[in-house]
Each structure stands twice: as C-alpha cells, then as structure tokens.
Image: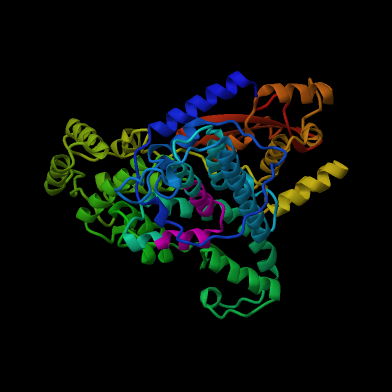
Amino acid sequence: MDDKLFEEQMKNLKNSYDQMSTISSVEKIVGEVKKAEKPYKRKVKLTLPYVASFIGVLFIAGLLATQLLTQPENTGTNSPPAKNTIENQPVTANDIETAMNEIRGYYERKVDELEEELGFQDVEQYAFVQEAKEAVQKFEERTSFKTQTELKNYTNNVKQIIDLRVSLPNEEFELIRSITKDNQVSDEEIIKYIEKLEYLKERYTDRWQNLHQPHQVQITNISEYVEELNSPDFNKGSKEYIELVEEMKRIGYIFIDDGEGTVYFKINYTKVSEAFRNQMSEEFKLYLDIQQGAKIASDAALTISRKDLEKQIILLEEIIIKSPNFADLNALKLHYQQRVEIYLTGLDNSPIIDDQGIVNKEVLNEFENFISAYPNSETTKIVKSFMSRLKDQNNQLTPQLIKEVETLIPANLKVIPNGLGVNLLPLTDQIMETYKTYKETENNQLLDGPFAGNNTIDLVVARMYMHALETEDYEMAYALIYKGQDADVPTLEQFKSEINNAGLDIQQLSNEVKMVDFTYTQNGERIEHTYIKKGGKTVQLKLRLEDGYPKVEYRSLF
C-alpha cells in the first residue's frame, strides 16, 4: 500500500470514529483481572486495509470503540486529576511505543490462546477477531496523547475490546454478564455474542458430523438421546466424542432433533434469554423467543391473537432496521415477511374473509387502527398500499392480490432470495486438509468430498482459492485456475504480478459476505457464485468444469 493511499484510509477511518456516539462506564466491562503479557512481536502480515465503513458499524461491547476517540480522558470520575501528578505528565514517544508494544503483545497472546483452544491457526480470519485487530491497528496509528491518563485509558479500552472479541463465546458471555450487574448490557453486545457462535457453527458442524456418525447407529430413540446429550452428565461413546459434546455445550450450543431422523445442534438461545432478559429490549426478546422455537401458527391456524401478531411485526421491523449488519438478518426478515403475509391475508384455518371472499369488516378496522397506531412505521406503508388494492377489488381477497403482498415489502425489510448461508474464511478442518493434500498432489479426486455443511464441490474450490489469495499462496491459487479449452491463462509469474497489483481484499470480502447463490449453466459446465453482502450488495465469482471438476475462471473476482 503506498503512503498516499494509507494516509487517505487513515483519514476516512478517523472520520468514521469521530461520527460515533458516546458510551460511558467502559472500565466496568472486564473487571480487575490482569494477566502476564506476551513479549511484543510483529507478525509477517501486519497491516490490513483500514476500511472506514467496517469500523463505522463496529458494535463491540456496546460500541466500546467509540470511546477510543470521543472519551479518551474519561477516568470514571467527574473530577479532573490534580495538577503536577504523574497522570498529567507529558507523554513521551517512548511511553507511546511502550503502550503499543503492550497492546500488540496482548493481542497476539490472546490470538495464540484462541488458536490453541480452537485447535487451528487461522482464527484471525474470523470477522470477530478482525474487529479486535482493527482496534489495535487504530491504536498504533496514534502518534500523540495529551496526558498519561488519556494514554492509559485508551490502552485499557483496546484491551477490553481484545478480551471480548478474541475469546471463546462462553468467555465473552461471562464478560457480558459482568456488565449486567450495572444494567449496562445492550442488544448489540448480545448480538455480537450470538454472531460469534454463528461463525463457529461451521467448524463444530465439521467436527460433530465426523465424530457423531459412528454413534448414530446406536440411537433407538432420538428424543431421548437428545435429552441425554443435553444433560450435564452425558457419558456415552468414545472419550473424544464425550469431550466434544461437553465442549459444544460449554461454548453455547444445545443439541436438537432436526426432524429428519438425525441429531444436530443450535445456539442455546434459552441460556441467553434467561441471563439477559431484564436488560434487553422488547424487540430482542421477541427475536430470542422466535429462535427458541416459539410458533405463531399450527395446522394452518394462528396460535396467537392478531393483536400479538401486530406487535411482533412492529418489533421485528424495529430490530431489522436498528441492526442492519446482524449476521442472522435474513432470518429476521423471513420471520417478518411471513408475519406480514399472514396478517394481511390470513390462514386457511384462521381466515379473514367471508364465504364470498370479502375481507371482514372487523379486519378492515384492524388495518385502520394499525395505520393510526404506527403512523411512521414501514409496515404501515405496506398496509396502506394493500388496503388501496383491496378497495380496487371491492375488498375481495383474490389469489392475485395475495401474490402481490410480497412485492409491497420494501428492500430494507425484504428477504434476500436464493441465499444460502456461507462462511468464506477461515476454512474448516476438513477443507484445510483437502487444501494441503491438493497442494502437494493436485489430485482432482480429492475435491469429490463429501464435505460437511453447505459446502458443495464448487464452493470448496472457491473457498480454497480465496484462502490461497489471502495467505499469498499464489502457486495454490494458480493450481485452482481453469486451464481447459479456450482458457487464456498467463504464466505463474504474470499471475502473481497481476494479483499483487489488483488490490484485492479477500479478508474484507469474507467479513461482509453472508450468503451465496449458485447458478449452473451449459449442463453444469459453467458455474457462477453470487456472494451476497450485508445490505444485499453482491460479488460474482465464475467457475468452469475442467475434466469434470470446477476450477476458477482466470480474472474472476478482479
């Protein structure tokens, strides 16, 4: 990165921080635990591009990062330090260098600990670790401080961010619980914890499917077995299997019957709800209730009142709008859309029409009351538009009008279609093993899989290609390039040169992408991945079959 571009990105990042709102009581988050520091060192690949938009939406411990600039001298007291104290002494360049070494060493020690706990070396590729890394890099940008107090508080704030983000979910959970003693926990803090569990879910899916499969044949009653798995004294199976079950429960998962004759797991939302229910908003309480499995309908009939349905719709709208970068946002939008459709059109066993298909007067009055009660709601616009179309049909609910409901939902509340949840980086253990072996042999049969989770063969190839680019393993990336018929591929040296000059930020792409849509054409010979980012923006990657195996088309992602 040249100096001019670096300075411009630094300026953008600072502007992003300056625009954040102020939060107080930071020092209460972690408590008084102080661990021995790892000696300072710099890793080979230190600097990532500083992306202002990424930091701008950073909710870390209730927007802790805000205080790094907006409250640099907050000491937790309303009284300024006395004059001529150590705290008011000038800050030397040596003081700043010492603090930077302390923070960098602390961050790297925490990364090493997390790598050891999770059992692999690419934890920095997780978006939640990237958040802490960005905070460290922002700290290293500072060249001056007004007082020793400002430097001390800035250092402590960054450490607290590291403690929260570079940790296992259960460790972050306990840190957040410590905040609740002063009723300071926010929805964003809990969302960050849940997102961390979502990111790690693929890794545990990989391990679970590998270890659970030999034990699957011994299950005679899935419901009873799930109950045993979730009990605190589960002890059936191999030592490694039992240890994995206990680890997953400790991390924050719970085992379930997936309804298809197999055992799976999900985030233990009940644990979250019980711990934080008195501190969280009504919107987030509803989200947790939905995720815990609370139903609104059964056998084509509502199981809640229409008034409660209205309330859920409004609460879902509010949390979607307030948390546009939530990892599970599309699931929220799906719940919202389903409820709006039910509210406007009814269900077979909870109809809103008479025998002639005319909407009941009571329901029309409900619509009017909804508009009056929530005049500024996005849903109100939907209800108004729907009522206008109903009026044109003499209040008859036609099949065509039912189909049109989906078109009334605005883009910021609408489900992104055809999206399959995906992680790009880091690779799972299984995919990484394939990566290493393929690099040595280039044996295409290794790509046959099967791979755990949603990983199709072409997605595995795409992810390995991106991992190769991110780690600057250009020989491996080149090996995954399509070189079949009509291929216009440069030499390896030319490829390396072009990649180095392309300015690709694969890590940032991985941070932003939430879903992928697959398109197969020419009898599957050509494949296009559409990676869907937060907010619906997309990036395309094209693949093509070479000897029956998908390879990345040259210049794809450029």
Q: Position of residue 374 (x, y in %)?
A: 18, 41
Q: Quadrant of the C terminus?
A: top right
Q: Measuring from the top left, give residue 217's x and y in whole percent.
A: 67, 73
Counting labels gives: 0
Residue in view at x 50 percent, y 38 percent: 91
Residue at the spot x=82%, y=44% of the render?
438
Indicate whether residue 159 is drawn in magenta. yes
Image quarter for residue 118? Answer: bottom right
Name the quadrant containing residue 398.
Answer: top left
Horizontal arrangement in the rendering, residue 253 relative to residue 106 (left or right): left
Q: Looking at the picture, how far across and down is residue 477, in whole percent?
A: 76, 34
- On the picture, is 249 further left or further right than 124? left
Residue that sits furthest to the front in the current view: 84
Of 399 and 408, nearer the camera is 408
Is residue 443 in view from this perspective? no
Q: Is residue 395 above or below residue 342?
A: above
Q: Quadrant of the N terminus?
A: top right
Q: Within the magenta stretch, is there residue 395? A: no
Looking at the picture, tell me which residue is in the foreground, 44 or 498. 44
Horizontal placement of 21 versus 129: left or right?
Answer: left
In this rendering, would 265 be left or right of 405? Answer: right
Main SS of residues in magenta = helix
Could you tell me which residue is drawn at 70 percent across and 71 percent down? 240
Q: Is residue 63 visible?
A: yes
Bounds of the magenta segment: 157-178
Tell me if residue 451 comes above or below residue 320 in the rendering.
Answer: below
Q: Nearer the viewer, residue 117 or 161?
A: 161
Q: Position of residue 422 (x, y in %)?
A: 57, 45
- Viewer-nearest residue: 229 or 402: 229
Colour setup of the view? rainbow
Q: Residue, x 60% and y 47% (percent of image)? A: 102
